[in-house]
Image (cartoon, helix red, strand yellow):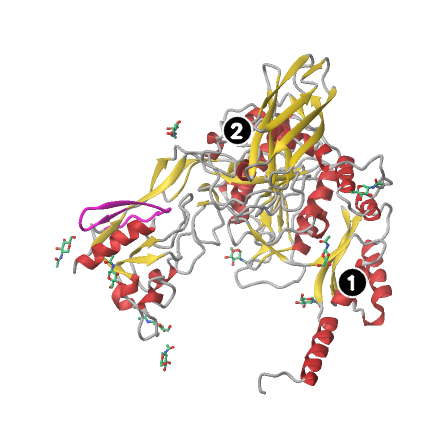
Amino acid sequence: MASKISFFSWLFLLCLCLISAMLIHKSYIVYMGDRPKGEFSISSLHLSMLQKVIGSKFSPESLLHSFRRSFNGFVVNLTEDEAQIIARMANVVSVFPNEKKTLHTTRSWDFMGFSKQVRRTTLESDIIIGVLDTGIWPESESFNDEGFGPPPSKWKGSCQASSNFSCNNKIIGAKYYRSNGKFGSTDIQSPRDSEGHGTHTASTAAGGLVGMASLHGLGVGTARGGVPSARIAVYKICWSDGCSDADILAAFDDAIADGVDIISLSVGGKIANDYFNDSIAIGTFHAMKNGILTSTSAGNEGPLPASIKNFSPWSLSVAASTIDRKFETKVQLGNKKIYEGVSINTFDLKNAMYPLIYGGDAPNITGNFTGSQSRFCSINSLDANLVKGKIVLCDLSTGEGPLLAGAIGTVMQGQGPRDRAFSFPLPTAFLGPDEGADILSFINSTSNATAIIRKSNVVNNSLAPFVPSFSSRGPNPITPDILKPDIAAPGVDIIAAWSLASSVTGLQGDNRFVPYNIISGTSMACPHATGAAAYVKSHHPKWSPSAIKSALMTTASPMSSATNPEAEFAYGVGHINPAKAINPGLIYDAEPLDYVKFLCGQGYDSILLKLVTGDKSTCSKAINATVWDLNYPSFALSATRLEFVKQVFNRIVTNVGSPTSKYKATVTAPPGLKIQVKPSILSFTSLGEKKAFALTVEGRASRSMVSASLVWDDGKCQVRSPVVMHFIP
Ligand SMILES: *[C@@H]1O[C@H](CO)[C@@H](O)[C@H](O)[C@H]1NC(C)=O
Ligand SMILES: *[C@@H]1O[C@H](CO)[C@@H](O)[C@H](O)[C@H]1NC(C)=O
Ligand SMILES: *[C@@H]1O[C@H](CO)[C@@H](O)[C@H](O)[C@H]1NC(C)=O
Ligand SMILES: *[C@@H]1O[C@H](CO)[C@@H](O)[C@H](O)[C@H]1NC(C)=O
Ligand SMILES: *[C@@H]1O[C@H](CO)[C@@H](O)[C@H](O)[C@H]1NC(C)=O
Ligand SMILES: *[C@@H]1O[C@H](CO)[C@@H](O)[C@H](O)[C@H]1NC(C)=O
Ligand SMILES: *[C@@H]1O[C@H](CO)[C@@H](O)[C@H](O)[C@H]1NC(C)=O
Ligand SMILES: *[C@@H]1O[C@H](CO)[C@@H](O)[C@H](O)[C@H]1NC(C)=O
Ligand SMILES: *[C@@H]1O[C@H](CO)[C@@H](O)[C@H](O)[C@H]1NC(C)=O
């Protein structure tokens, strides 16, 4: 009887749910497409629109922000019902909840064959890179403006200066965005970076040359960005609790109007949203429409298939790859055995040997912890009296627990991936489970177990470059016939500038505040591609975002599926090669209208697209384009398993190499896949000349993916595009 819910209580609950669904206000983004032409107050337009729909119940304070400089829309607190009414209005493209996105947490340029001596243009100092991130540490040596002239005249942005924050001729603009007006205890209410991430990404893209940069002597070298003379415009959108869609869009609205040349965004959402329901896809679309390429991070949710987070065809999606060095940390036991762990250990222990104890043997009994809990060494779980002054063997944890309990170091053991190194707040080496079991039996075998953890060594990683497990993989979750990610760039153990308000790990008890830090993520890969894109732009200032992207993609160095079985779904076209990208020979260009044609072909509502583009083009037979005809620098074809498919891809290449040149097509394809290119020779007689060709793919996807490639070669330039056929399970 007791478990039975009476009809009336059920009805009561139902009503309660309905009432609360009606009354709970949530913050929404209302996206209305392109900026309307003409001079009038857009926010009063938004207010009167809301008043009309919602009526007297509407309070003006719930309109949190109006986008008005580069596109049209606003952020507003609404009930679900109100949101639905607004979504049905004729002048609204989409309405979606304002949610939080997360950060996708230097020898790297040399590793890309991009030396300090590469040919640079004087135009580089006119390039402005917009960095949407956690802000910046303006006093960092990487942002020293010595020798810089005033900002380029096209710059229309501003600096939110205060007694504690100022810009200079390197950081020419800085603003912070916080539409909900709430700040956490570690947040600094200025464009100043309290996290480190934004300082790291900005200096990777455009930091100046700083000699002898290192993390406590590790990774010593010259820290530098891809374009050391370029300017930086900072848009702080990420705070201690994440990066909200409202703030991301507000920053795009400004950055586009401020006159930045390239945008860098190392942030992504939790799920794959439809293009018009995603703040980053919308922001990057308007950036592209205004001639600005956005470089985005693929995400850190790999190696799951389709885990890529930023995949719109009008932006660059960057996967992470390793560079040719790795951090190794040795552990020596009292029995003289030596293990090679992975970690970034800056600490130099003084004594010869320290007592070694297993975390599982040192539970904090007064805190009611058992050995099966304390082996994870979480905060409070260890008995401080037993671990003080010792090295503790732990099952993988952050190291905060042992540090706070007074341990001198930790040996972490576990299954975790070992293709990048982490920092811990105390001397730490990370070993695999077999080595961990070995050490545990050593501890068990003696009453006097001792060990020492050495400072890390930097060793050659001869397998590099490969894509580490964390980097998000394709295929593209929304448009499987556009290959994503686009390209790979260094994102593992990258040294770059850091915020002095954040320690090396950001963990409790870590007192190492450093000007340069070593971290990993597609967040670190993205600004490498941003710097490379800016470098191409400094040589070809008139090139469109798609042309720059094509140049970077077709000149990339092929990577090997031997180390990455997911092949192009891990690394896209391959490893970025900025020095080569300024001379691609041919480019696959696309203008804003081409992306509109693509969206028409994808079945997007033609009336909404008209709002998005702000012009008269509506979808029709004449402009509808299939996904295969978008002039993309790579080729992807999805099918069901073992289905026989034959598909034609139409492409147009533009000659940007030698005025007179003859390119020959070379195709490499695995057995079972037939690829034809017509014509197979393209002859050019002038620069800027365009030639069309058709590539036909015929076959069956017998494996989950098969890779092939097309190379146009004139003897000087090899214009390479991967061709991928895959089946959707
Ligand atoms: C808007 O809604 C959010 C919850 O999504 C709430 O925290 C905030 O206080 C609301 N703001 C206003 C001005 O009503
Ligand atoms: C966009 O988001 C809204 C609100 O969550 C949802 O109702 C709508 O179906 C979404 N549209 C698409 C195309 O995913
Ligand atoms: C200036 O910023 C630093 C770094 O965050 C902080 O420690 C200091 O308290 C700030 N000073 C003022 C006056 O806000
Ligand atoms: C314990 O081992 C260390 C070296 O591993 C040695 O120096 C020390 O004398 C030993 N202590 C005891 C009590 O056996
Ligand atoms: C054990 O845990 C309790 C509560 O969790 C904590 O207050 C105490 O400091 C811990 N004791 C030791 C010896 O670490
Ligand atoms: C530990 O458990 C005992 C018995 O259940 C309880 O009385 C005591 O409060 C617990 N101590 C802590 C620190 O949780
Ligand atoms: C070591 O001893 C622990 C008990 O302290 C036991 O659970 C474990 O199985 C032993 N491990 C090895 C490898 O001998
Ligand atoms: C690392 O090893 C590879 C292959 O063995 C070699 O080509 C490369 O030059 C080495 N790099 C360094 C920095 O020694
Ligand atoms: C454009 O293509 C879409 C998707 O294939 C289709 O739904 C729509 O009817 C087409 N429009 C025209 C005018 O052909």
Image side of residue 686 versus residue 375, left or right: right
Which stretch is magenta? 331-350
Q: From what the image shows, is residue 184 above or below residue 655?
A: below
Circle 2 SS class: loop
* Residue 616 location (% of width, % of height): 87, 40
The answer to whether any part of residue 605 appears in the image is yes
Image side of residue 337 versus residue 126, left or right: left
Q: Label 1 neighbourhood size at 10 Å, few (<14), some (14-19), many (20+)?
A: some
Along the line of sight, the residue nearer the viewer: 106 or 26: 26
* Residue 123 location (% of width, % of height): 64, 28
Q: Picture quarter containing residue 670?
A: top right
Along the line of sight, the residue nearer the viewer: 575 or 248: 575
* Residue 707 location (% of width, % of height): 56, 32
* Residue 353 location (% of width, % of height): 20, 52
- Dot 2 amino acid type: Pro
Along the line of sight, the residue nearer the viewer: 433 or 151: 433
Q: Earlier in the sequence, mark 2 or mark 1?
A: 1
Image side of residue 211 versus residue 37, left or right: left
Q: Which numbered tag is attached to residue 586?
A: none
Q: Which numbered tag is attached to residue 558?
A: 2
Image side of residue 343 versus residue 53, left or right: left
Q: From what the image shows, is residue 54 above or below residue 569?
A: below
